[in-house]
Amino acid sequence: MIRLMLTLMLCACPLSAQANEVEGRRLFVDPKSTTARVAERLTGQARRDALSMARIPSASWFTDGTPEGVERKVRALVDRAAARREVPVLVAYNIPYRDCALYSAGGAKDGAAYRAWIRGFAKGIGDREAIVILEPDGLGVIPWHRTLSGELENCRPDGIDERAADTRFELLRDAVLVLSTLPNVGLYLDGTGSGWLSPAEASSRLIRADVARADGFFLNVSNYESNARLVPYARWISDCIALVNRGGLEPRQCPAHEKGVDDDNLAAASARTAAAYNQLFGQLGVARDPALQKRAVIDTSRNGRGGWLPPQGKYRDAEVWCNPPGRGLGRRPTLESDEAYVDAYLWIKIPGESDGECLRGRGGPADPERGVVAPPAGSWFAAQARELVELADPPLIAK
């Protein structure tokens, strides 16, 4: 579970006015962040929007480079955070076949390169404090992977075969082994989101990736799902892992949650799923204990308005995760949580950066919903940044 430092730092406590501060520690606001650097070349409202977001602690992404290069970059950032007595959030995003060669394609050239890279990443942290988000999409998009029901998923890159799925889990287990030995790191694996995998599927993958050595899992990275959907989903994944590990349950026996439920019926649907888990705990004689179970960190960078509901029947693939219109910044990052299964709310995806050149099943090149060609994934998207600031919930006033 969470080591002593993070047990204090990521406690389940009532929210205070200083939401970013716990036991004297604060999340790191990097004056050299990508958002701060973008603001330097912008003007007018676009600059004000970027500066407003640059003042809020966000994760720092490490996506490429040599082992020596990533070690230097991580060390420099962690040094800056330590000098300010703040806690950085670091994203390791370099696993082979990252994003299945789609909008965020890339990653290390092979397993050996990745193993060396993650060791450089870890050396850069050393014994300093950090929260590590290990490989967004790493368990959601797996090359040549079969689900619990035996269905072959859609990520099938050329030149490799179904052994690639086993390799993905081997690499993640190795990364977990390396990073979990660092004394002051909170480590989280990909739990996807409530609109994606079932709790059974997510838990099965987390267990195979050795979540037992990690502090928990992260949800909603680069997505827009509301906290009202993610908080119960976090509990169900945590419960499923506990029922498998302590009750001998097969992962596929964990109850599924109801997808596609509208907001008006969400509470009732969540209660039904919760009741199904309660029944299993009773049947198996397992005591639920959130203090001992795996917990989540939730990406709230862009979920202030919840997910996008596209016009019915308009798109063959609406890509609801890809630069959806009318979204807003979400809850400010905080190391405090009043939810038993949530360690923290973080801004992991950098708000204002594009999700990619969204085509929504059309021929492109323009996004048919926005009428423009969106910037490549990771590039600044001023129009979307304006929406996020303007529609933020809670409100954010650009200065």
Image (cartoon, rainbow, N blue to C red):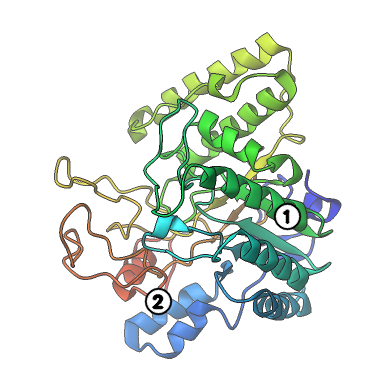
Q: Quadrant of residue 131?
A: bottom right
Horizontal side, residue 388 vs residue 137: left or right: left
Q: Is residue 117 left or right of residue 152?
A: right
Residue located 17% across and 47% down the image = 315
**Residue 297 in view of the camera:** no
Front in this rendered view, residue 148 or 331: 148
**Left or right placement of residue 308 versus residue 16 in this view:** left
2 or 1: tag closer to the N-terminus: 2
Give the position of the N terminus as an image quadrant: top right
Q: Which residue is mark 2?
A: 49
Give the residue pinned by disc 1.
Answer: 186
Q: Is residue 186 above or below residue 310?
A: below
Query: In terms of depth relative to the viewer, which is nearer, 347 or 111?
Result: 111
Q: Residue at x 58, y 20 (%)?
A: 277
Could you give the CA–CA distance between mark 2 and mark 1, rounded to whole angstroms?
31 Å
Q: Give the number of callouts.
A: 2
Q: Which residue is painted at 38% across and 31% down in the image?
A: 259
Q: Splitting the image into 4 quarters, where does residue 82 fall?
A: bottom right
Badge 1 amino acid: Gly
Residue beneath the point at 35% across and 47% down:
307
Quarter occupied by the C terminus: bottom left
